Image (cartoon, helix red, strand yellow):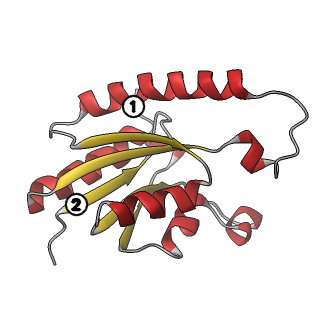
Amino acid sequence: MSYQHIVLAVDLTDYSILVANKAAAICKAFGGNLTIVHVIESLNYAYGGDVPIDVSDIQEQLETTAKERMSVLADQLDIPVQETIITQGGIESEIHRIAEENNSDLIVVGSHGRHGLALLLGSTANGVLHGAPCDVLAVRVHKSDKPE
């Protein structure tokens, strides 16, 4: 199997570079294209639309910060990035939508490997896996792997 279009879903934390390097290596191996996506979960979406204050300024600040971090991440990779996307909405559904619209073969996402109650309740990686239009690679990251 050959992966020609890979969607890398990142949370833009310090661990994102570890996951991004795995995605970049796969792109290199298959000669594929890389799209990086970050989803800002809308505060209205996260709280079911019952946010009693205007959150537009907060959402704008989140987007500005995300653009800056996305640029830094893309510049750190040793492959060209076809596209970077910052969007708002439900994390899993937005990643699925972008992967489908781009006819992606693979979604790469980080997984913190939670245990116990967090595992039962599910994680973003688990949510992306279910309902994905293509293969999903969950890259395990540990606190000890934190880049300096």
* Residue 147 screen position, x and y as percent: 40, 33
In the current view of this chain or complex, which residue is farthest to the right?
52
Residue in view at x 33 percent, y 39 percent:
84
Between residue 37 and residue 51, name the one nearer to us.
51
Residue in view at x 50 percent, y 35 percent:
13
| Element type at mark 2 | strand
- Write down the quadrant of residue 114 in the picture: bottom right
Task: Give me the C-alpha separation between circle 1 and circle 2.
Answer: 19 Å
Q: Which mark is residue 55?
A: none
Q: Residues within 10 Å of mark 2 (few under 14, many from 20)?
A: many
Q: Residues within 10 Å of mark 1 (few under 14, many from 20)?
A: many
* Count of labels in the image: 2
* Residue 40 screen position, x and y as percent: 58, 41
Lateral position of residue 39 relative to residue 23, left or right: right
Q: Quadrant of the C terminus?
A: top left
Residue in view at x 40 percent, y 74 percent:
133
The amino acid at mark 2 is His
Residue in view at x 22 percent, y 36 percent:
77
The amino acid at mark 1 is Met
Between residue 12 and residue 42, name the one nearer to us.
42
The residue that disc 1 covers is 70
The residue that disc 2 covers is 5
Q: Is residue 98 above or below residue 137?
A: above
Q: Quadrant of the N terminus?
A: bottom left
Q: Are marks 1 and 2 in contact (CB under 8 Å)?
A: no
* Residue 112 screen position, x and y as percent: 54, 54
| Element type at mark 1 | helix
- Mark 2 or mark 1, which is nearer the start of the sequence? 2
